[in-house]
Amino acid sequence: MTTRAPPAVTAIVGPTAAGKSAVSAAVARALQAEIVAVDAFTIYRGMDIGTDKPSAAAVRHHMIGVLDPSVECSAQWFQGEARRAISDVLSRGRHPLLVGGSGLYFRAVVDPLEFPPTDTQVRRDLERRHPDAAAAYEALRAVDSVTADGLDPGNWRRAIRALEVLALTNRPFSSWRVAWDRYESCYPGLRVIGLDVERKVLSARISERVDAMLAAGWLEEAAALRTKDLSRTAAAAIGYAELWEHIDGGCSFAEARERIVARTRRYAVRQQRWFAADPRVRWMSPTAAVDWLSGDPASELSGRTRDV
């Protein structure tokens, strides 16, 4: 293999069960890299089996198990912490390898996205003043026609949110979304590899992985978390609600298992669609990804946009 100087930051993205953990471990060893996990749920402690946390034994990981599940995790918070982790890796002359399937968190980390503030009291005041969608939409159109033109007039909550942001920042809501449409990274030379796995193969892998996680003690892990005060974001992790329903007698174990598989497959489709919209993602098989990222110039990039 030939040796190539890697760019500052590399990312491996794709749907759940595509093989990101195995690929990233192999690539990290080849590049002497450190992995920065870009995942909405592996960030929580005590949610190891259900989030399929990677083993950190051979490769140093960041952003894994750093929050108690009682704490809310926002994209803005994740952005700051992950960027600090990347800076730390770079400062030590190492290569940051971003790995994950959470599209929002990925873009929050690599792109100059801004997250406008929120204020519960301001929002409630606006809701009282504009109690229905029509009233909120007309109020928004009067002060921010650009944002209003891009909204569904029947989306009351979105109109209220736009009015809230304007009240708090004196900036139109539309101005906060400029970076979303540009796909211009904060990290020069960023390369993003998407793992391309055929839909039927991915579906089978999801089923097999759920069974492996259940065999590893996922039900017991869910039971241990049942009595804890979980944050909204932690409780949204796929599978826990289904297992809690089984524990509470609301469904059989087999029914819970089927619901987890179905929900995971739907999530995988959403992940594929999210990353397919990013023109920076170059799609290849897991095997080709390992070879190419490790420095084998014979490995080809598909360079295509996924049809999902």
Image (cartoon, grey):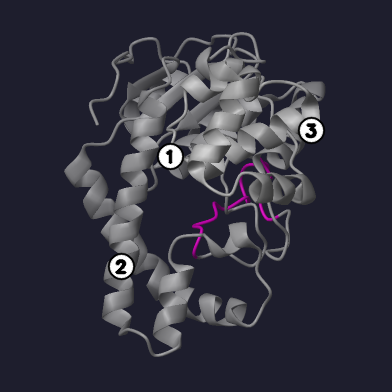
Q: Is residue 232 visible?
A: yes
**Element type at mark 2:** helix
Gap in angstroms between the C-alphas marked 3 and 2? 41 Å
Whether residue 236 is situated above or below residue 120 in the rendered picture? below
The residue pinned by badge 3 equals 168
Q: Amino acid at mark 1?
A: Gly
Q: Main secondary structure of the magenta part?
A: loop
Label 3 amino acid?
Answer: Leu
Label 3: element kind: helix
Task: Give the residue drawn at x 64%, y 25%.
Answer: 173
How far apart are the two marked residues, 1 and 2, measured between alpha carbons?
32 Å
* Numbered mark located on residue 154 in the image: 1
The residue beneath circle 2 is 259
- Which residue is the extreme one toward the bottom? 249
Q: What kind of element bears circle 1?
A: loop
Amino acid type of disc 2?
A: Arg
Quick one: label 1 or label 3, which is nearer the N terminus?
1
Query: x%, y% of residue 270?
Result: 36, 41
